[in-house]
Amino acid sequence: MTNEKTVEYYGGIAGALLPPFIFISGVITLSVLGAPDERGFWPILILALSVGLVLAKNKEAFSDSLLEGMSQPVVMIMITAWMLASTIGVLMGISGFVEALTWLANQLNLGHTVFVIVAFFVCVLVSVSTGSSFGTILICGPLLFPVGGLLGVHLPTMAGAIIGGATFGDCIAPVSDTTIASALSQDADIGGTVKTRLKYVIPAAIIALIMYATSTITRSGELLQLPPQVEARPLALVMIIVPMVIIYLLLKKKHLFHGLFAGLITGVITALVFGLLPPGKLLSLDLEHYRATSFVIDGINRAVGISFFTILLMGLVSSVKASGLLQKLADFSSQKIETAKQAETWIAGSVSATVLVTAHSVVAILTASEFVRQAGEQMAINKYRRANLMGLVVCTFPFILPYFIPVILMANATQSGAEFNIPAISPLDVGLHNFFSWALMVVTLFAIASGYGRNSAPTENQSA
């Protein structure tokens, strides 16, 4: 994303930083106070954008930067995907799939800890196969979270296991945009990057599994009861075909829309054939209140909160990028490097700062890539190490902090438990319990401080 006009702010760097500071501090405050969902973040974003407009010297350039950020194709892709996925989630709920999955877990005598570990590995499998953390959360979140809740699993740990498994694939999958961007931006082949990244990801996964198990054992409760009006129907397990169709098409490199639409159509037909979807849920008229009702409408309504949040956030990010702040950071840090450890510290720090400002992993990688290359080559840090540092860093903050889209998306997915009287989880709790990303952060810091993995690189044959 590039801006034709540079946005200058009264107060210079301080003026450019004030809008994102207002947003971040506001979101963290609301999260600590227990804001129920992303709708509570709307006023904070509006305030941040208003302050940015007041401080911008050129109001037209500021306004153009907002529109440029909001109108990116990726924004429309995310919003449409969330609406489709949310609609599928509502359909799966109507069909009784969650209750049937709970029934199956009880039949198999899956305890709290086993279920959480199984959920983590299911999400790992989906995310590694598809390379998409968003897709994994959209597919697995609304299905696994309420089942865990009904089984009495500690809810924040359940949410953390789902987003942790989704993060794993985003970090390591050869088809992940994070892996591809980090590797190619440093002229490293993807195969060699994945092989060398395993030495960081596997230890982090082991640490995370221990933490998930410990948290589940010490904090889970008793098996919850299904609401009196709800009866588990094992027949509803047939709806497993819906996520299977979506995952299959994504593995075949089909477009995300293709997979979601196919999953929705398959789900509607399957539910109707097996009597799991009352025809009136497809579309009916409420003449008394002058409106139409449909599970599709309900699904889209569920996605409104995160959709508007994303639009506003991308506008704020674009306005900050247009200030040239990130380039100034790179220029400053390049003058402070004297050793390999210092170079890696500045690489991790600059990528961290960039992702904190841009709120998008791939955008952060591409923005910081030239500085990373120059700093790394200056201290003879090989291309795989540089690519891995970038990939590791962008799989920590965006999956931990409460204002990043993956965390908001996972918090949104926990609303699927509402019909079973299972409370939703705040973005703050989701991030705090993503033990995989926390472990990844620890491993990354250890690798920089100790030099672990610094001098290792695959041979030409191994990386081919």
Image (cartoon, grey):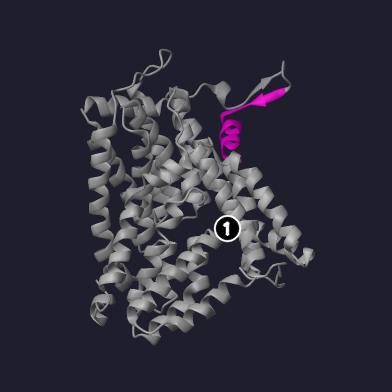
Amino acid type of the residue tagged 1 in the rendering: Val
Residue 41 is left or right of residue 219, and the answer is right
**Residue visible at 57% across and 44% down in the picture:** 306
Residue range in magenta is 291-304
Give the position of the N terminus as an image quadrant.
Answer: bottom right
**Residue visible at 74% across and 21% down in the picture:** 290
Q: Main secondary structure of the magenta part?
A: helix
Determine crowd level at label 1: few under 14, some 14-19, many 20+ residues with C-alpha closer than 10 A: few
- Examine the rendered structure and indicate whether residue 29 appears above or below residue 361: above
Nearer to us in this view, 457 or 428: 428
Nearer to us in this view, 269 or 456: 456
* Residue 80 at x, y percent in the picture: 58, 47
Residue 238 is left or right of residue 356, and the answer is left
Give the residue at mark 1: 74
Residue 373: quarter of image = bottom left
Residue 8: quarter of image = bottom right
Q: Secondary structure at mark 1?
A: helix
Q: Residue furthest top?
A: 228
- Examine the rendered structure and indicate whether residue 257 appears above or below residue 92: below
Nearer to us in this view, 7 or 232: 7
Q: Is residue 250 visible?
A: yes
* Residue 174 at x, y percent in the picture: 35, 64
* Residue 351 at x, y percent in the picture: 46, 68
Give the position of the C terminus as an image quadrant.
Answer: bottom left
Q: Is residue 176 magenta?
A: no
**Residue visible at 40% across and 63% down in the picture:** 393
Nearer to us in this view, 25 or 276: 25
